Each structure stands twice: as structure tokens, then as C-alpha cells.
Image (tube, rainbow, N blue to C red):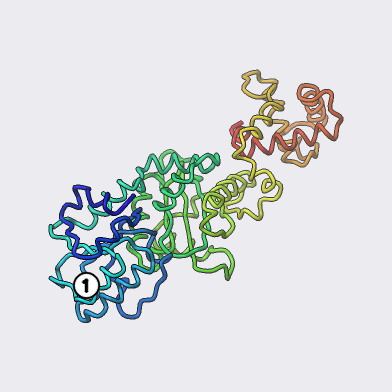
Amino acid sequence: MKLRDVMKLSELSGFRLIAGEGGLDREVNACEIIDFEFADGIEFSREEMFYGNSIGLTSLMFARYDTSMILDAVKQLDSMGVACLSYKPIFFKELPEEVLAYSETNNFPIYEITDDAFFEDIVLAVKKEAGLDMTEKEVEEAFEKVLKDSISDNECARLMHMVLPKSGEYLQAVCFEGISEAETVSDPFDRDHMVRYSRRLSLDPRYSDRVTFVRFRQGGLVFMTRKDTDGGDMDVLLKDAATATGLPMEEAVTGMSEIVGGDDFCKAVREAFWAMQAASLNGSRIMKYRDMGVYRLIAPQMSSETLVKSAKNFLGPLLGTENEDLRTLLVTAKEYVTSGFDLNKTAEKLFCHKNTVRYRVRRIHELLGGSLDEENFRESLALSARVLLLEGTLRKI
């Protein structure tokens, strides 16, 4: 989207170009407020402060005691690929000649905002026009597509823009889901609570640039960033941010991704989600992706419909039936796999004799793979059951 086209928005009708007309074909995909970034003592990089080809909005308050700071700011913004600078004439009615001269020479557009439009309204209007703004429903639907590995590059970029912290090149994702089953207890992860936690986080300068909370399904996602790969997982940052905002992570089952680069955002989301599922299977409160054991071998393929469909086909004779005998065999198959094919352990879980389990396993073998030898039957049963345990079907029985 070209700058000249963005300036046709009604919300930007009060923008008057005062210099840099040669730069009106610059690309725009964001709009951001700039007021403290150029204050004395603050050092930053483009990745830390801006999303990309932004329209920069400012009152120039940072330069009210030193007009030379305006030229320095304009040069830095230009070098970082910011599309233009737009200022309200609150502290400066006119800009220094050297700033206008730089603008003209380098085709860096500068606008004066001549009306009383609110910066926030301008930001939202540009984001909407650029297709970067998303509703809560759209965000949740986008995360579902991430899990299925079916999200487009454009939609993924929009999602990242909406949910990622502003600073830091390296990312760790956390997925959590509430574990309380008491119907009388207020859900600490419902929309109202999550909005409250997110608002507190945004107002806390210790975490607002490095941590974000997003509601998802019956829990949510946390995204944490940092500038380098040094150090281990960001457990401490997660705990501190949750404590500061009141997010009750102790009431949730949690999965944590590996630390990845920003380009692996979707991978991090999937890792965190499947680690959470594995934690639930193992009866753990928290699971890291690297510690998932055999489920780590399955997780990368869980977005494939073929894998889940194959597992359901193998267990098909036992699935989707109200026949009590077949349902008993399905439960037995599940416990047999999770007990490591140990008849005694399976019998203890099912409160029956191991000979009963032995008989049921023989029946399962006959129904599911009568032509398979014992070793191949066990391998097929183990893989199919674990896929559907991770996917959720077998956890519901």
C-alpha cells in the first residue's frame, strides 16, 4: 500500500504535506506513535521499536528543549525504513529549515497534522486499511489455522503483528489451559479475566515490550521475547509476568516451545500447544517441547490430516460406537498402550484380572489387525493410540 493512497483515508484528511513529495510511493503497512523513542539516553534498533514501513505520529515533545534532535530523529527514521513523519504543531509551529531540506533531498515525506484527530484513531484506521487489524474471533481462527499448518503468509504476518511483543528477535511460546472442573468456580481464563491481565501487562514497563497474553480456547497463549539466544528458557520471565498481572498459571496445565527466531512463530505456537497436550496426558502441570518423549516424534506431523485419519482408520472398529463391549475394548487398548503393554499394570488400572486383560487384547488384535503378527500389531496399536491421545479423541473416553 503506497503512502499517497493511505493519505486518501478520511481519518487522515487533516494531514498537510510540507516536504518530501518525492517519497509518496513509499510502502506503508503500519502506523505508530513516536514521542519518547528519541529522548536522551535511549538507544534502540528498528526491530525493537518499529514493525516496518510505518507512518510515524509525533508531537515532537522529545525535542522541545533541543530542536537539533528533530533532524537526528528524521535521519534515524529514514534509515530504518519508516515511511514518513507526521507531527502535531503543539511544541513546534514550524520545523527547522535543515529538517525540511533533508526531507526534500532524501524524499522523506513530512506531514503537519492540521486537525484535532486522535493518534489512536489514526493508528486504527491505517491498520484496518493495511489489513493488519484483526477481531478476537479472527485471531482465534488464525491460531486454529496455525495448528493445522494451513495459514497463509499474509494472515500469519497480520497475526504476528497483533500478538507478538514489540521487542526482541527470539521467541518462546507458552500454551496453557485451565484445569479446574468445578462449575461454581469463576473461570480465571475467560475473556474478561484475560483482558484484565493483558491490560495490567501493557501498563507494566518491566514486561510490556517483552511479554504478551492472548486468550485461546479454554486458556491462552503467552509470547515472550529477548534479544539473543544466550541463557536458557524464559521460565522466570513467565513466572514474574504472571505474578505481576495476576495470571494464575498454577491453575493451568502448560506447554512451552523451544526458543526460536521470529520467522518460526508458527512452529513455536504448535510446539507449545502439543507440549501442553502431552503435559495433560502425563498428568503434569508443565511440559517443555524437548521433554515430550515419544510424543515429540509425533507432534510435527499432527497438523497432517493423513496421520490422524490413519490412526482413526486403524482403531475404527472400536471408535464411534455405543456398544459397551467395544467401548470396554477401546478403554483397554488405551490403558494397555499407556502401561507399556504390561498386563499387570493394565489390570490394576482397569480393576480386573490380568487374564481378563489378556483376553481383551486378543479380541482387539482380532478386530483391528488379525493378519498382523504380534510385534506389528503392538507397534500399530501404540502409534495409533498415541496419535489420538495427543489429538484428544482417546482422552475423552
Judge the density around disc 1: few (<14), some (14-19), many (≥20) Cα neighbours within 10 Å: some
Residue designated by label 1: 61
Residue 351 point in image, percent of width and height: 72, 33
Residue 369 point in image, percent of width and height: 79, 25
Q: Quadrant of residue 345?
A: top right
Depicted 317 relative to depicted 293: above or below:
above
Depicted 304 relative to depicted 54: above or below:
above
Identity of the residue drawn at 22% across and 48% down: 9
Secondary structure found at label 1:
helix
Identity of the residue drawn at 70% across and 21% down: 317
- On screen, residue 313 versus residue 366, left or right, reads left
Depicted 105 relative to depicted 16: above or below:
below
Identity of the residue drawn at 23% across and 77% down: 98
Residue 177 point in image, percent of width and height: 50, 46
Identity of the residue drawn at 79% across and 28% down: 361
Q: Quadrant of residue 21?
A: bottom left
